[in-house]
Image (tube, rainbow, N blue to C red):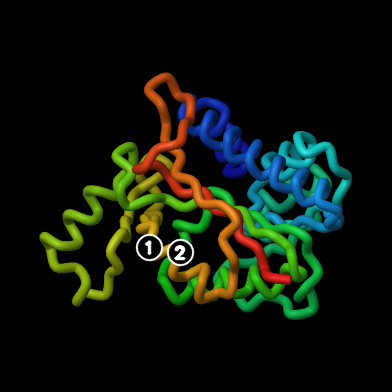
Amino acid sequence: EHAAAYDAQDAQVQKRQAYTSAIDIRVAKQLQDLAGHGQQVERVMHLACGTGRRAESIRMMAGLSYQMFGVDLCEDMAEQAQTRGVEVQVASLTDPFDAAWNGTFDALTILYAYGHIPSESDRLHLLRSAFEWLRPGGVLCLDVFSLLDPQEWGPKAAHHFEAQRLGPQGYERGDVFYRRNAGEELAFLHYCTKEGILNLVERAGFDVLDFASIAYAEEGDVQRSEDGKFFLTLQRPF
């Protein structure tokens, strides 16, 4: 039921559908570019893969025949992803990563998930683990919620962080707690600054191939904008 609701939200909310589709197209193009430049694209890992719907769509748009792998915390979603051909490990992204997979993936994705990691140290751990799982020359594609995005809670979160002096209370600038599923569950989301995310990816060892800010348009389309969500393409150096 939870997995079905997850996919239904993407399908029913026009802005979210337009945004996730635009990101998936970007990821598929990056995989095509890798293959077009003579690099192997045989194993792709989707961290927080959900039901595998986006992983399957990305591979179809890329027109490639690589193996799909995933990690997700929800067993229900993992089961659905398995039916779509994704080999899934049920685990949290804050858990230690299996070192046996170090250097074995040509590409990784972290889509609509990075902001749910609860602390800067955990987010850095995730990026460093992704770095280790990639082969030299492999790429990581991820999207990040921006603190400046007027379509999101980021600007209000920044205001309350300063006004209520939340730093000494253990919060990070950009932290938001909210209720979902008709108020039955408390959820967490972190909004990032451009400087903050670039600092973390540099500390993790990545080179930045592309950094884009993408926002919703009024009619639900997406476009480049200085105050939209961030989309990054990162590479483990050769």
- Give the side of residue 119 with respect to residue 49, left or right: left
- Near-viewer residue (168 or 37): 37
119, above or below 146, in the image: below
- Near-viewer residue (136 or 102): 136
Q: Quadrant of residue 238?
A: bottom right
Q: Give the class, few, some or many, for how many residues have Cα within 10 Å of label 2's Cα (few <14, many ≥20).
A: some
Q: CA distance from mark 1 to mark 2?
A: 5 Å
Residue 93, image x and y in percent? 58, 67
Contact flag, marks 1 and 2 (Cβ < 8 Å)? yes
Can residue 18 be seen in this snapshot?
yes
- On-image quarter of the N terminus: top right
Q: Give the class, few, some or many, for how many residues have Cα within 10 Å of label 1's Cα (few <14, many ≥20).
A: few
Q: Residue at x 22, y 72 (%)?
A: 167
**Residue with the most extreme left position:** 163
Can residue 80 be seen in this snapshot?
no
Q: Which residue is mark 1?
A: 195
Badge 1 amino acid = Glu
Residue 31, image x and y in percent? 75, 47
- Give the side of residue 232 with respect to residue 44, left or right: left
Badge 2 marks a residue whose secondary structure is helix
Q: Quadrant of residue 91?
A: bottom right
Q: Residue at x 17, y 56 (%)?
A: 160
Q: Residue at x 26, y 75 (%)?
A: 170
- Give the side of residue 151 with respect to residue 86, left or right: left
Q: Residue at x 46, y 49 (%)?
A: 230
- Give the side of residue 5 with respect to residue 149, left or right: right
Residue 55, image x and y in percent? 72, 45
Badge 2 amino acid = Leu
Q: Quadrant of residue 65?
A: top right
Residue 53, image x and y in percent? 70, 40
- The total number of labels drawn is 2
Q: Which residue is mark 2?
A: 198
